[in-house]
């Protein structure tokens, strides 16, 4: 277990936890993007996609957008990921993550 002051460190993925005091991490853990914010990102993206599909109608571009709708979940995860990192760093934390983090 690493012996370090974790007060300004944010462990970002659970693959790192084996190296740290899990009970200390658990007591201090927070997620910087609220469920409401994530939900709003999702609703805004879906609304914009629907608006564009309506605008483009039955066209190549409109059909591509409908097919691309399946990518929305991944896009929302990426937006949430980068917003989380931004907010963590904005609060002055050093981000700790493993090489197994996929995003």
Image (tube, rainbow, N blue to C red):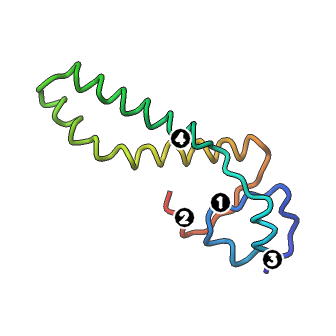
- Residue 75, labelled with which disc? none
Q: Which comes sooner in the sequence, label 3 or label 4?
A: 3
Q: Quadrant of residue 8?
A: bottom right
Which residue reaches farthest top?
Answer: 55
| Disc 2: which residue | 101
Q: Which comes sooner in the sequence, label 1 or label 3?
A: 3
Marks 4 & 1, CB-CB < 8 Å contact: no
Q: Which comes sooner in the sequence, label 3 or label 2?
A: 3
CA separation, marks 3 and 2? 20 Å
- The structure residue drawn at horizontal position 50% and vertical position 56%, both measured from the top left corner, is 103
| Horizontal side of residue 79 vs 9, given as left or right | left
Residue 30 placed where, x, y %? 71, 53
Marks 2 & 1, CB-CB < 8 Å contact: yes
| Disc 1: which residue | 12
- Residue 2, labelled with which disc? 3
CA separation, marks 4 and 1? 17 Å
Q: Which comes sooner in the sequence, label 2 or label 1?
A: 1
| Disc 4: which residue | 38
């Amino acid at each position: 277990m690493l012996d370090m002051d974790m007060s300004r460190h944010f462990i970002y993925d659970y693959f790192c936890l084996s190296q740290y005091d899990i009970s200390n991490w658990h007591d201090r853990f927070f997620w910087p993007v609220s469920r409401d914010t994530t939900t709003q990102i999702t609703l805004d993206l879906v609304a914009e996609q629907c608006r564009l599909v309506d605008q483009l109608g039955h066209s190549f571009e409109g059909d591509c957008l409908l097919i691309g709708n399946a990518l929305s979940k991944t896009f929302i995860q990426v937006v949430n990921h980068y917003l989380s990192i931004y907010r963590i760093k904005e609060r002055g934390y050093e981000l700790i993550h493993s090489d197994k983090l996929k995003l």
